[in-house]
Image (tube, rainbow, N blue to C red):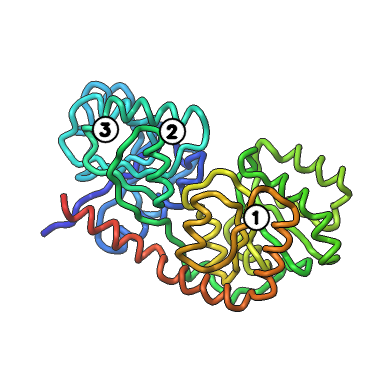
Amino acid sequence: MSKKSVLMIVRKYPADFGHTTVINNLCIELQKMGYKTGIGAFEFTSSPPQNVEQVLLNKFQLFFHGVKILNYDIIFLHQSYPSYYLLTKKPNKPIILYYHGASNRLQRINFKVSMMFYKNKISKIMSVSQAGINQMKKMIGDVTAEVIYNGVDTNFYNPDLPRPFKKGEPQLLFVSALRPYKKASLLISFMPNLLKKYPNAHLQIVGTGEEKLTLENLIKKLKLENHIELTGRIDDNELKLRYSSSDVYVSASTFEVCPVPTLEAMACGKPLVLFDIEPHKEIINISKAGKIFSKEKNSDFISTLNEVYKNRTSYQNSALKFAKSHDWKSITLQLIETIDKY
């Protein structure tokens, strides 16, 4: 039996909200296992991974002819917006919605509207966490979906890397686009009191975005230039060394679904200290790789961090075990079980 071809679709590539890592790795692993893969988008500002076909989508053609013009057996829809063009005509092939979350008002509106019109044309819904399924239920009511967690490249991100960016004790790391709901400002505000307990503590924040100037000004206001570094955007080769150089991965984000940086940190053997939201609790409960801090209390963050840091060896072992069981090959094999049913 010949293997099916698979097309991953987003509005533009690379995607704005972190889907790119997931899409790229799924395509790469599917290619290794003999499946033809492509990435479809209405706009490309860079090329997909090697041997993954770049499919420039035409809104006019899709609106009037539907997915039958796409030379692929199965379509994975990773964002709601393209559904207006792909699903106006009844599809002649399986359409699988891959839910990564809806972090802002426009995304939530798009999801609700697209589900109102096109839910019955979707063959299957997948979510990157149980928390994601619960988010969908809050928006559209009852929904049936399967969980397939995000994965991690455990060869690229691993615990045996050097530590060239180690600058403090403990060394903390947060990786994200700098958006308001990611709450990097909260991590910065914790530092003055944390320094009373750990005078050499250092925080590195990796990423860029609309909050960058606000965070820079906050660091200056609190006179924390020697204890906090905003790295800006960095490439993956530097990123893996930032993970390896850290002692604990931290996040105060108030919206996630299945954040990839937590998996990358765990693959490097780093324990987690995460803010009390459902997706973070899900990660901690299934991995046992760290602890949750709650309700934006400065004292709670510091006591939680202290407990994790002191017992980091145990948490590191749990982190590595979880990462190894969620490498991209394992995640892709789960996806293939769905692909091969159609």
Please tell me whether mark 1 sits on a helix, a strand or a loop.
strand
Badges 3 and 2: C-beta atoms under 8 Å apart?
Answer: no
Picture layout, residue 87 above or below residue 192: above
Front-most of 6 and 90?
90
Q: Earlier in the sequence, mark 3 or mark 1?
A: 3
Q: Earlier in the sequence, mark 1 or mark 2?
A: 2
Q: Give the residue number, with chain letter if any, for mark 2.
A: 43
Q: Which mark is residue 323?
A: none
Please tell me whether mark 3 sits on a helix, a strand or a loop.
helix
CA distance separating discs 3 and 2: 25 Å
Q: Which mark is residue 174?
A: 1
Q: Nearer the viewer, mark 1 or mark 2?
A: 1
Q: Quadrant of residue 82?
A: top left
Instruction: Give the amino acid type for the residue marked by disc 3 in the picture.
Output: Lys
Identify the residue at horizontal 46%, vertical 47% (top origin).
20
Instruction: Give the amino acid type for the residue marked by disc 1 in the picture.
Output: Phe
Please tell me whether mark 2 sits on a helix, a strand or a loop.
strand
